[in-house]
Amino acid sequence: MILAIDIALLVMLAVVGIAIIRLRNLFAVVMLSGIYSLLMAGTFVLLDAVDVAFTEAAVGAGISTVLLLGVLTLTKSREKIPVTTPILPLVTVIVTGGLLIYGTWDLPRFGDPNAPAHRHVAPEYLAEATHETGAPNVVTAVLASYRGYDTLGEVTVIFTAGIGVLLLLSGSGVLRRRDPETPDEKPKSTA
Amino acid sequence: MKHHLIPRVVAKLTIPGILLFALYVQFHGDYGPGGGFQAGVIFGAGFILYGLIFGLQNLRRVAPPAVTTAFIAIGVLVFAGVGIVSQILGGNYLDYDVLAADPHAGQHIGILVVELGVGITVAAVMITIFVTFAGRER
Amino acid sequence: MEVLGHFNYWIVVVLMMIGFYALIARGNLIKKIVGLNIFQASVFLLFISFGKVTGGSAPIIAEGIEVYSNPLPHVLILTAIVVGVATTALGLALVVRINERYGTIEETEIAQMDGES
Amino acid sequence: MISQLPALQVVIPLIGAPLCIILRRGALPWLVALLASWVALAMAATLLSQVGDGEVISYAVGGWLAPLGIEYRIDVLNAYMMLLVAGTSSIVLPFAYKSVAKEIPEEKHYLFYSGFLLMLTGLLGMAITGDAFNVFVFIEISSLSSYAMIAMGRDRRALSAAFTYLVMGTVGATFFLIGVGLIYAVTGTLNMADLADRLPPIYESRTVLAAFAFISVGILLKLALFPLHLWLPNAYTYAPSVVTAFLAATATKVALYLLLRFGYTVFGADFVFDIVPSSQVLLALALVGVVVASTVAIFQNDVKRLLAYSSVAQVGYIVLGISYANVTGLTASIVHIFNHAATKGALFLAMGCIAYAAGACRLESFAGLGKRMPMTMAAFVIGGLSLIGVPLTAGFVSKWYLVLGALEKGWWPVAVVILATSLLAAVYVWRVVEVAYFRDPPAEGPVLSDPPFALLAPTWILTGACVYFGIETSLSVGFAEQAALFLMGGS
C-alpha cells in the first residue's frame, strides 16, 4: 500500500519536474518548484522522515520560493529560447542516470529490514540514543549529540551563506533605494 | 501593502503566534519533530512577514542590520562555545556528558544549548538575507 | 517483487536527472538554480529511501512500537537540506549582482559580453 | 591539552570567523584572522611532529566512539596537508592587510576576513576528518565561502566566474554526496576506517562501483582535472589577489588529498587499481590535461589567467604521479602538492604586488617592470623557474621524482611528455619575462615601483621556499615519502 502511494507521489514529482523544464514563464517555474518541494515533503512523511519533511516544507516551499520570487521581481521573468539544442548535457545526463541505475542494481530491496544500513550503527542509535541523551526523538539525539559536529558544520554553512550574501549584496548601492535614510549604505565607486 | 488595514490587523494578530510557535518548536525538538533549524526558520518568517506588511524601514527599526549581523555570529559562538566548555571541563570537544554532574542531565543541557545556537543563527541569517535582498529593489 | 523493490530507486534517479538536466542544459540562471534545487531534493529522496524499513514508523521512540525506520539518513539529509538552501541563497545573490552588472541573466548573453570586454 | 589539539585545529579558525563579525571595527578582524591562522599553523606543526613516525591519532568528537560518532583521524598525510593549508594562510594573511585595503571596499573588510577564515576552516576540516559525510559538510563550507570571495573581484567577470564555479562545485559536491549515500546503503557506516573494513567483501557489487565513480567524479570536479577544469581559469583570474593566491595554493590540493584518501584508505588500492582501470583513466586524463593546459597557457594575454591554466597543468602532473600506482609516483605527487603550493603561492602573490601597483595583470602592463619593480619581478622569475622545473628549485625536485617513477614503470614516453611540457612552461614564463625585462615601459601613465615591504616580505618568503625546498629536500620529500609508504602499506 505504502509502496503504491509512494510510486504515485513519485510519478507526480516527475510530471512537475518535466513541466519545470518545459515552461518558460519563470513565475510558473518558481511556483511549480514550490509544489515540487511540497510533494517531496509528503513523500518524506510517507517514508517516516517527519523531521526531514518538516524542514523540506519550510525550506523548499518556504524560504527558497520566497527568495526566488524576490529575485524574479528584480530580473526578467521570461526565459529566452536557447539557440542550440543541448546535445552534450543530454549525453551527460543519460550517462549519469545510466550509471546510477546500474548502481542501484545491487542495492538492497526498497524497505528491506535486513539491509546493511539497518543492521549496523542505526540499531545502536535506536536502542541507546533515548536512554543516553533523554531525547525520545532519535533524529534530534543523533543530530545534536552523536553527530553534533556535523550540525556545527551545518550552522557554519548557514553562517557562511549569511556572510556571503552580505559580502555580495550589502552596501555598494548602485541602485536607487526607497528608503534613503539608512546610513550604512553609501554608493561605491568599485561596484 | 502598508496601507491595507486587513493585512495589518491580521499580521499584528498572527506574528506573536508565529513567534510563540517558533519557541515551541525550538524547545520541543527532543520529543517531536522539529529543532533549532526549523524554529529559526519560523522565527525568521515572523519577522519577514512583519517586513512585508509594515515595510522594510520598520523592519530595520525592529531588527537593526547591525544587531542581526551580530546575532548570526553569536549563534555560531554559542554552539562552538559549548564544545570549548566541555573541553575545559575535561571532556572531548562537544562531549555533553561532562556539562553536568549526571551525564543524562549534561546531554540534556548540551542539546538544548546547541539547538538554541542553531536557532539564533538561522533566524538571524533569514532576516539578514531578506533585508539585503529586499534592499536591492529596482 | 524484485523489480518492484527497485522501482522506487529508478524513479528517484529519473527525478535527479530531470533536475540535473535543467541545471546543465538551461541557460537561464534562475532556471539553473531551480534545477539545482530539484536535483538536490531528489538526491535527498534517494537517501531517505535507503532509510525506509517496511512496516516501520518514524524514529521517535514510543511505547508499543517495535520497528522504526533508520534515523541516520534523516539526520544526514537534514544537514544536506540546510546546505542546499545556503547554496540557493548564495547563488541567487550572485544572480542579482550579475543582473545588475550585465543587465541579463541568460548564460549565452553573459558569455558573449565576457568575450567582448 | 595536547590531546585536545585535533579538535582545536579546526575549531580555532571556526570560532575566529564569527569573532571577526563581532569585532568588526578597523584592523581587528584582520588581527583575529592572523592570530587564528598562526595558532592553526603551530598546532598543525605539533600534530605533524607527533604522527611523523607513522603513528595515527584518533579523536572522538563529542566523546562518541566511531562509528557512532564522528572521528578525527590524523596520520602523516593529512597532518602534512594541514601544515600546508595553515602555512599558506599564515603567509598570505600578512600580505592581505594592504592588498585587501586596496581591492575591497572598507566596510566589507570584516566580512572578507570572516570569509577567509571560513575557507581556512573548510579546508582544514576536509583534511582532518575521518567521516565520509563530515567531509561533505566541510567541502561545502570551503566552497560556499570561496564562491563569495571570488565574486569580490572588481571585474564583473568575477561574478559570472563565481556563478560557474558555484554550479560546477555544487554538482561536484552533490555527486560526492550520491556516492557516499550509495556506500552507506551497502555498508551501513560512514566512518572511513569502518568503510575500509566493510568494503572489501563486496568489491564486486555494482553499487560500490557506481559509488566509486560518483565520489571520484565529484572530487575530480573540485580539483579541476582536465576536462572538468572549466570553472578554474576565470575564477583564479578575476578573484581578489589574496583569494587567488590562497585558493591556488590550497583548494585544489586538499581535493587531491581527498582523492588519495578515498582511493587508498576507503576503497583500497586493490579495488581502485585492480578492479577499476583507474590507473589508465587517470594517466590519459592527466597527460591530455598537461599538454592542453600548458599549450593554452602560452596564448593567454592576462598573466593571472596564464598562471591559472598552468595550475590546471600542474594538477595534471600530480594526478599523473598518482596514476603510476607506485611509491615513487605517489611520493612525486605528494611532494608536488607541496612544491606547487609554494610556487603558485609565490607567483600569485607577485601578481598581487603588481595588481597593487598597476591595478591589472595584463601582459602589456608588464612592459618595463623588470626595471621599475625589480624585487617583484625577481620573485616572479624565481617562481617561474620553479614552475618550469629548473634544478635548484622546488619544481625540479617534484619533476625529478615524476620522471623517475615513470622510468621505474618503463613508461619512457610519459617521461618524454613531462620534459616536453616543461619546455612549454618555459615558453609561457619566458613570454612574461621578455615583456618585463626587454620592453620599455610606456611613455605615459604613472611610474610604477615595488610595493611596500608588507607585500614584498610574504612574497619573498614563499619565493625563498621555492629555492629552499629545491636544495634541502629532507623535510618536503621526507614527509611525502613517509605518507606514500603509509598509504601503500595501508592497502
Image (cartoon, coloured by chain):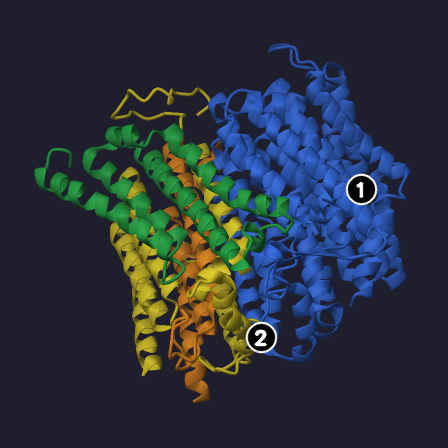
Give the residue number, with chain letter if any, for mark 1. Answer: D423
Image coordinates of residue A42 in percent, x first then y, are 31, 67
Give the residue number, with chain letter if any, for mark 2. Answer: A120
Q: Are marks 1 and 2 in contact (CB under 8 Å)?
A: no
Give the yellow chain's letter. A
Image coordinates of residue D430 in percent, x first then y, are 76, 31
B57 relative to A118 in the view: left or right? left
Q: Colour of chain B?
A: green
How many numbered badges does the structure rendering display?
A: 2
Q: Amino acid at mark 2?
A: His
Quarter-of-image position of residue D485: bottom right
Give the blue chain's letter. D
Quarter-of-image position of residue D216: bottom right
Give the orange chain's letter. C
Element carrying mark 2: loop
Q: How far apart are the two marked residues, 1 and 2, measured between alpha carbons?
A: 55 Å
Question: Which residue lies at the image location 42% right of the left edge and 70% below the top edge?
Answer: C59
B12 relative to D368 in the view: left or right? left
